[in-house]
Image (spheres, rainbow, N blue to C red):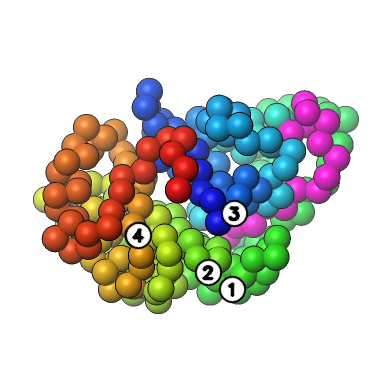
Amino acid sequence: MKLTVLGSGGSVQTLERACASYIIDNKILIDAGPGSYRNMLKAGVDPLQVRVLFLSHLHGDHFFDIGPLIWGMSFMQRTEPFTIVGPAGTSAMVKNVLSLANTPPSFMKFAMKFIEIRPGDHFVSEGTNVLTAPGNHVIEDVAYRIGDISYTGDTAPSDSIVNLATGSKLLIHEASGLAESESFLKEVGHSSSRQAAQIASRAKVEKLLLSHITPAVSNKKNELLNQAKPEFNNIEIAEDLVML
C-alpha cells in the first residue's frame, strides 16, 4: 500500500503544512484538513479516482477541505458515487457545509453515500479490511486500521490504539507537543512524540510516522525525535507530499 501525506499539520494550516490528510493508493482518503485538497492536486492525485473518505472526528482541522474536495469533484464532472465514512454526525456536517456554501443542486452529478460508524466497528471497504477503535480525545474519535496502516486521528495515549495497531507496518500517530507539555496535552486529548513512540513500541509496529505537528512544535523537529527515539527507533516526522 502506498501512502501519500497530504497534510501533516495540526490545529491550523501553516505555510509549510496543510492539516491532517493522507491518501492510500490514490483512492482511499483519510481526513481532509484545510489545505489538503490543493496538496492532492500537487501530488498528482486525480480526485475522480478517490473512492472513499474516512473521517476520524469532526474537528475542523480534519474536515474543512470537504467543501473544496466535493466542489472540485463536481467541477471535474464526477459521476461515480463517493462514500464518506465517519462518526455520528458526519452526514449532517457534510450537508451543512454544502448548504452554507450555497452549493447549486445541479452542480453535483454524483451520489454521496454516508456510513456512520461506532469505534470498534469492522468492515470491508474497496476490498480492504478496515478495523476501528476509539481514540482518547475530547470528542468521539475513530482510529482506523486500513490493511497494514493504522491511523489514530487525535488522541491521548490509549490502550485501544495499541490493540488496533499491533503488528502494523505503519502507525500514523499524532504528536502535538513535547514531553514537558504532557499534562496539558492530556487535558485536550493529545499526545507528545514520546507518548506516541511508547504506543508504537507496545504495539510492535514496523514504523512510526509522527504527524499532526502543530505550529507550536513545527520548528522543534529535533526535540520531537530526541524525546521519542529512546522509546522507539524507527521514526519519521511526517512532511506534506512525502510518499511512503
Residue on which disc 2 sits: 132
- Three-letter code, disc 2: Thr
Please name the amino acid that badge 1 sits on: Asp
Q: Are marks 2 and 4 in contact (CB under 8 Å)?
A: no
Question: Which residues, given as a range, are shown in magenta?
Answer: 73-87
Of marks 4 and 1, which one's residue comes earlier in the chain?
Answer: 1
Answer whether residue 200 is visible to the viewer in this image.
yes
Q: Earlier in the sequence, mark 2 or mark 1?
A: 1
Cβ atoms under marks 1 and 3 closer than 8 Å: no
Residue 33 x %, y %: 50, 39
Asked whether residue 33 is drawn in magenta, I would say: no
Residue matched to label 4: 207
**Image depth: mark 3 or mark 4 in front:** 4
Rendered view: 119 above or below 192: below
Label of residue 121 in the image: 1
Q: Residue at x 68, y 35 (%)?
A: 46
From mark 3 to mark 4, how far is it between C-alphas? 22 Å
**Which quadrant of the structure image shows residue 99?**
top right
**Cα–Cα span, label 1 and label 3:** 13 Å
> Is residue 83 inside the magenta stretch?
yes
Whichever of callouts 3 and 4 sits on the residue coming sooner in the sequence is 3
Between circles 4 and 1, the one closer to the viewer is: 4
What's under tag 4, amino acid-wise? Answer: Lys
